[in-house]
Image (tube, helix red, strand yellow):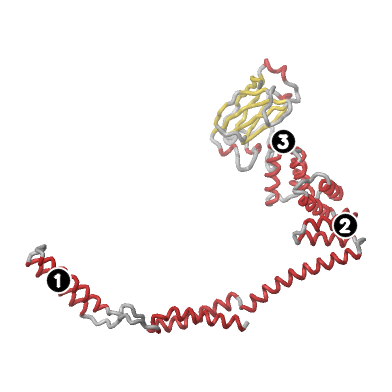
Amino acid sequence: MITFYIAAIVLVLLVLAALFRPFFWKTTVHHASRQQLNAAIYKEEIAKLEKERAEGLIDGATYEISHAEMRQRLFQDTSEDDGVAVLGSPKKTIIALTIFIPVIAAVMYFWFGSAQQIADGGAKQQVAQQDVEKMVAGLAAKMEQDPSNLKGWAMLARSYKVMGLPKDAEKAYDRSGSYLDTDPQLLADYADVSASNANGSFEGKPQAIINRALKADPNNMMALWLAGTADYNRGDYKGAVQVWGRLAKLLPADSEDMKMIQGSIMEARGKANLPPEPLASQATPPVAAVSSKNINGTVEINSDLKSRIKPDYIVMVIARAPGARMPVAIMRGKAADLPLRFVLNDALAMTPDALISNLSEATIEVRISKSGQAKAEPGDLYSEIQTVKLGTNNLKVVVDQVRP
């Protein structure tokens, strides 16, 4: 502490010395007053005027007038006695700086915290970290002496995980044995650590641990997330959609976790060529009332193509913004219901950010598919694309073509 105070005082003195150097260490340069400077300037101007007359650049009358004006300005500028050197500073400045700088330094010091508080804070943080490491090391030594304490191994594993030591954590989880089956959250943590040590792979051991966790608690959220991630990583996108769908039902509707899982589900559905689900917050009536915010009509099929479809084939009515690939609304029905009435509105949006009600017009097309996949396949039946205004009623769409 004494060293800190000495250093602080020395720094303040150095700053003051730098500021007051012009006042205490005088140079041999003479500081001219404002009067003297003005007089020197006018002397130069008069000499210049004399030179111009001598060279014939100005006539005698002009010289006399200019010379008189200069004498008058010189008299005015030097008549007031300022008595102050141009490079000088008032003594009040010295006094103000001498008081102001130490006072501000002291206020900032006591406001933001003393050196002792800063030193104590850093020391406490270091001691706390050392205490944790010492405690965990002591627990590890104790577990080596009592390896049958399964609960102790689980505690040690969680401690290692918190400390960012996943390999040590997995080894401790390995020795926790059957105790983990009593706590699905511990099993989920175990699976997470195991997958992390396997470079993100869930194959084998991590998947087996996830299965144990879900067996103990089918609604454990972390285990559901890991299970969906495992399905996604192995290319089972439908499985990921199903598992993450279960997780979504457990999350608060307006939470950040919900937004994240919805984004993951949407991505998985796209990779699985699954159609987007309607927004859960809105229900679609079989026949909606006429509205300027939707497009409604009827789907029919050309009589020559009726023999190519079966009752369980899927009919998809798709609306897009003109020129866009991403649908803003999709309605699905069965071929058995043809001619099929449809209403395309915001309840059938893929995302809340892309709504049909935001458009002035949309393109409408219909596709009939055996598999119901979002991606068009050979043999699918489809209609011509029509561009219609939002609010169009009783639109007639005829399916009359076959994809080769």
Residue under pointer 1? 69
Residue under pointer 2? 176
Is residue 210 positioned above or below 337 on the image?
below
Foreground disc of the pair 1, 3 = 1
Percent position (x, y) of residue 182?
88, 55
Between residues 3 and 88, which one lies in front from this camera angle? 3
Percent position (x, y) of residue 177?
89, 55
Between residues 351 and 166, which one lies in front from this camera angle? 166
Q: Is residue 4 left or right of residue 78?
A: right
Question: Seen from this angle, which residue lies furthest left?
Answer: 60
Q: Quadrant of the N terminus?
A: bottom right
Question: Seen from this angle, which residue lies furthest top?
Answer: 304
Is residue 299 positioned above or below 67 on the image?
above
Q: Quadrant of the C terminus?
A: top right
Q: Amino acid at mark 2?
A: Ser
Q: Which mark is residue 272?
A: 3
Q: Residue at point 84% right, 56% down?
A: 173
The secondary structure type at the circle numbered 1 is helix
The secondary structure type at the circle numbered 2 is loop
For marks 1 and 3, the one nearer the N-term is 1
Percent position (x, y) of residue 277?
70, 38
Residue 158, quarter of the rendered image: bottom right
Q: Which mark is residue 157?
A: none
Q: Amino acid at mark 3?
A: Ala
Marks 2 and 3 close (CB-CB < 8 Å): no
Q: Is residue 22 left or right of residue 372?
A: left
Percent position (x, y) of residue 334?
73, 27
Measure the C-alpha gap from mark 2 to mark 3. 38 Å
The secondary structure type at the circle numbered 3 is loop
Measure the C-alpha gap from mark 1 to mark 2. 105 Å
Q: Residue at point 38% right, 84% down?
A: 91
Q: Amino acid at mark 1?
A: Glu
